[in-house]
Image: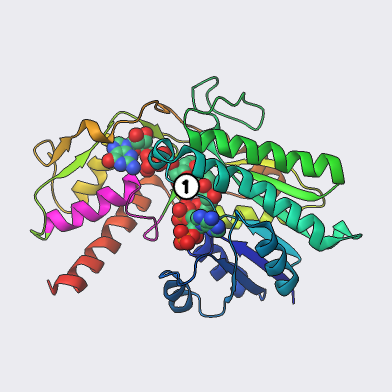
Amino acid sequence: MPRALITGVTGQDGLYLAEQLLAKGYEVFGLIRGQNNPKRELVEREVPGVQIVTGDLTDLSSLLRALNHAQPDEVFNLGAISFVAYSWENARLTSEVTGLGVLNMLEATRLYAGDDLSKVRFYQASSSEMFGKVQQVPQTEETLLWPRSPYGVAKVYGHYMTINYRESYGMHASSGILFNHESPRRGPEFVTRKISRAVARISLGLQDKISLGNLDAKRDWGFAGDYVDAMWRMLQQPEGDDYVVATGETHSIREYLDIAFARVGVSDWSDLVYVDPQFFRPAEVDLLIGDPAKAKEKLGWTPTVSFPELVEMMVDSDLAEQRALHGK
Ligand code: NDP
Ligand code: GDR
C-alpha cells in the first residue's frame, strides 16, 4: 500500500487530495500545525481515513519527525500562507512559511530518505502568481517569472529550490504551476467563494450587497478536484519535472458575477456590488491564462469542469449551506 504525506491537509487542496489518495488505496498522513488546530475536526469529519501528524513548515525538526513517522513514498507540499492580499501585510511571515518552508520540507525529505533518495517523490505547490506581470500569453513552463506580491516572490523561491533539489541531488521533485482552482471548499477570503457565498445570502435575504475590489482582473479558473489529480499524476512519472496546470481560458471577475447572479435569477447586479478601494492590491496581476499542453501530453491530464459549471457548483453549494444554517 503506497504511503503519502500531505502538508496543508486542512486546506482546500489538501482535503481533495487526501480524499482521492484514500480512494486509490493509499495510506494517507496529513500534517497539521498548532497546539489545538480547529481545522483538525474538519479533516477528521471530511476525510476520516487520514492519519494526523503534527508539524509546522517553519520547524525543520518537526517535519523530519513527521516524515519518519509517516514513512511516505510521496510527499505533497501544499502548506503555505496562500492568501495573496494578506502577504503584503505579513511579508516576512509569508516568506518564512511559503518560501523557506519549502526549503525546510525539501531538506527534511532529503534527510528522511538518507542514502536512498529514490525511495521518495516530492510535489511542490507552485503557482501562476509567479508569472505576475504579463510577459507572455498564454503562460507556459518557460514564461519569465515576474511576481507581483510577497506571496508570489516566496513561491518563486520555493519553485527554484525544488528545481535545485532535483538538479543537485537527483531528487524526484516536481513543481506544479497551478492556476487558480476553486470549489465549494475554497476559503471565503478568495474572490470566487466570497461572491458565491454573498450571492447565496443576498438571494435568501440575509445580506444586501457585496464589497469587492478590482472587477477587471482576469483569471484562469478551474475545479480543485481536477487539479489535485494533476499533482498525483506528476509523481507517477519516471522523472520529476515542472508542469503548468490550467484550463487555457480566462474570465474576469465581472463574468464570474454574471453567472453567479444569473444562477439565482438576477440579471443586473450593478446595484448589488459595491467597489471598495480597501480590496485593491498594491500591485495587481491583471491577466492569467495558462497553456496546459505539456500536462495534457505528458500526464494525460485534462480539466473536466467548465467555468459556468464551476460557478454554478459554488453558488448551489453556498445556497444549500446558507439554507441549512438559517433554516430557509
Ligand atoms: P489553503 O489556504 O486552503 O490551505 C493552506 C494550507 O497551508 C492550510 O492547510 C494551512 O493550515 C497550511 N499552513 C499554513 N501555514 C502553515 C505552516 N506554518 N505549517 C504547516 N502548514 C501551514 O490553500 P489551497 O488548498 O488553496 O492551496 C494549496 C497550495 O497550493 C498552497 O501552497 C497554495 O499557495 C498553492 N496554490 C493554490 C492555488 C489555488 O488556486 N488554490 C493555485 C496555485 C497554488 P491551517 O489550516 O493550519 O492554516
Ligand atoms: P489570487 O486569488 O490572488 O489570484 O490567488 P483571489 O481570489 O484572492 O483574487 C483573484 C482576483 O480577484 C480580485 N478581487 C478580489 N480578491 C479578493 N480576494 N477579494 C475581493 O474582494 C476582490 N475583488 C477583486 C483580486 O484583486 C485578484 O485579481 C489565488 C490563491 O489561491 C493563491 O494561493 C494562488 O497561488 C493563486 O490563486 C493562483
Q: Is residue 325 above or below residue 130?
A: below
Q: In this view, does 305 lie above or below 241?
A: below
Left or right, 171 with respect to 225, comes to right
**The C terminus - image quarter:** bottom left
Left or right, 194 with respect to 115, comes to left
Residue 25, given in percent of the width and then of the height, sits at 66, 76
In the image, residue 132 lies in the stretch drawn in magenta? no
Does any portion of residue 232 appear in the rendered image? no
Does any portion of residue 267 appear in the rendered image? yes
**The N terminus - image quarter:** bottom right
Identity, as a three-letter code, of the amino acid under mark 1: Ser
Q: Is mark 1 within 8 Å of ligand 2?
A: yes
Residue beneath the point at 55% across and 41% down: 95
Query: How many neighbours does mark 1 have within 10 angstroms: few (below 14), some (14-19), or many (20 or more)?
Result: some
Q: Kindly state the secondary structure of the residue where label 1 is placed.
A: loop
What is the count of numbered marks? Answer: 1
Residue beneath the point at 14% across and 42% down: 267
Ligand 2 sits in quadrant: top left
Q: What stretch is highlighted in magenta?
A: 183-203
Residue beneath the point at 69% across and 47% down: 103
Identify the residue under disc 1: 82
- Between 35 and 218, the one lying in front of the other is 35
Residue 33, given in percent of the width and then of the height, sits at 53, 64
